[in-house]
């Protein structure tokens, strides 16, 4: 076990190369605390080689022995890791009280406001390792990624949507956004065509397509009119796409019929689109691809 201390989070670094560091957490218990702590540890490039957790339902004591993952390219920022773990730990109530007593007396501290959500829109040209490089930059900037939506066009252009929060709570400022732009540009280089950061809402997480609009100049570059017209000529006839909806069959269902040429991952693409739009699929007939949906 770790060394008893009044500190909520302690990190004891390894004495020798190859030995694990010891992360000790002692704080009030809450549902999912162990899961949250392990997630943060993994996000910092560490592997848990051993763990010891004990709780009486009110207070928990957690010890994790961790090692940097093989091939992790950057040193572990231990101070930042400690801060992130501290943010996850509930605040201890004064001696003789518990959180229920404080809440009943109206003395419980208000929960900290949720971090502001922002939408990062990246329009760039696809290449090997693109998503890896972007996520590494966002991690270095202390951004937390809530959700990612990746779209790639047949000509190799990419539109990536990242729903992010800023650990520094400064992303609403011009200087912080410019810092993000500069770092992304330095890593992506000529692959980056456009980068935008705008405020977002929790509702936008459920349907990212609704907020994927870009500036007209970027849209013109991304969807070249001549290329679209040329492709449309080649897709006429047997490869024509048809999407029809019918609400007359049921008062609680909508029938969507999709007729198109086959390609790898077609069904996944369609089902993922329904999921992003929060639409529940009840029946799928993979002939012409008739899908019966109901609101979730």
Image (cartoon, rainbow, N blue to C red):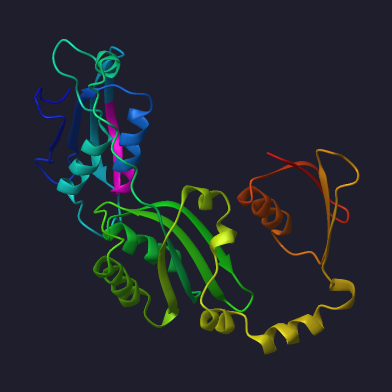
Which of the pair 279/15 is nearer the observer?
279
Residue 34 position in % (x across, y down)? 33, 29
Q: Which residues are magenta?
A: 42-51
Q: Residue at x 24, y 28 (%)?
A: 109
The residue lying at 55 percent from left, 80 percent from top is 216
Quadrant housing residue 267: bottom right
Q: Is residue 247 visible?
A: yes
Image quarter where the C terminus lies is top right
Query: From what the image shows, is residue 24 above or below residue 185?
Result: above
Q: Residue furthest bottom?
A: 226
Is residue 196 highlighted in magenta? no
Quadrant position of residue 12: top left
- Which quadrant of the figure contains the N terminus? top left
Is there any visible trace of residue 290 in the rendered image? no
- Residue farthest to the front, as pictured: 106
| Relative depth, front residue between 237 and 51 | 237
Residue at (48% x, 56% y) in the render: 148
Q: Is residue 177 left or right of residue 15?
A: right
Location of residue 281 in the rendering, given as x and y in whole percent from the top left corner: 74, 43
In the figure, is residue 222 to the left or right of 264? left
Q: Is residue 43 magenta?
A: yes
Relative to 274, residue 101 above or below: above
> How many marks overall?
0
Q: Position of residue 55 (x, y in %)?
A: 28, 16
Q: Nearer the viewer, residue 119 or 6?
A: 119
Identify the main secondary structure in magenta.
Answer: strand
Residue at 51% x, 77% y is: 215
């Amino acid at each position: 076990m770790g060394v008893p201390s009044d500190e909520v989070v302690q990190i004891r670094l390894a004495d020798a190369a190859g030995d694990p560091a010891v992360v000790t957490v002692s704080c009030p218990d809450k549902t999912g605390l162990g899961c949250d702590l392990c997630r943060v540890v993994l996000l910092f490039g560490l592997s848990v080689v051993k763990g010891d957790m004990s709780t009486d339902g009110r207070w928990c004591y957690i010890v994790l022995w961790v090692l940097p993952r093989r091939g992790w390219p950057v040193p572990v920022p231990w101070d930042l890791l400690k801060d992130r773990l501290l943010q996850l730990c509930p605040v201890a109530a004064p001696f003789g009280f518990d959180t229920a007593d404080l809440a009943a007396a109206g003395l419980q501290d208000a929960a900290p406001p949720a971090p502001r959500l922002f939408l990062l829109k990246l329009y760039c040209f696809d290449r090997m390792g693109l998503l890896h490089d972007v996520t590494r930059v966002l991690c270095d900037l202390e951004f937390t990624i809530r959700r990612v939506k990746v779209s790639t066009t047949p000509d190799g252009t990419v539109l990536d949507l990242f729903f992010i929060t800023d650990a520094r709570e400064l992303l609403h400022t011009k200087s912080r956004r410019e810092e993000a732009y500069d770092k992304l540009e330095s890593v992506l280089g000529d692959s980056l065509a456009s980068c935008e950061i705008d405020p977002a809402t929790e509702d936008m997480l459920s349907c990212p397509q609704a907020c994927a609009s870009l500036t007209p100049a970027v849209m013109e570059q991304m969807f070249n009119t001549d290329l679209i017209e040329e492709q449309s000529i080649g897709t006429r006839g047997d490869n024509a796409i048809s999407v029809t909806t019918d609400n007359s069959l049921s008062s609680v269902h909508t029938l969507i019929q999709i007729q198109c040429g086959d390609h790898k991952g077609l069904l996944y693409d369609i089902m993922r689109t329904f999921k992003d739009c929060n639409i529940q699929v009840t029946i799928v007939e993979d002939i012409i691809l008739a899908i019966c949906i109901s609101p979730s």
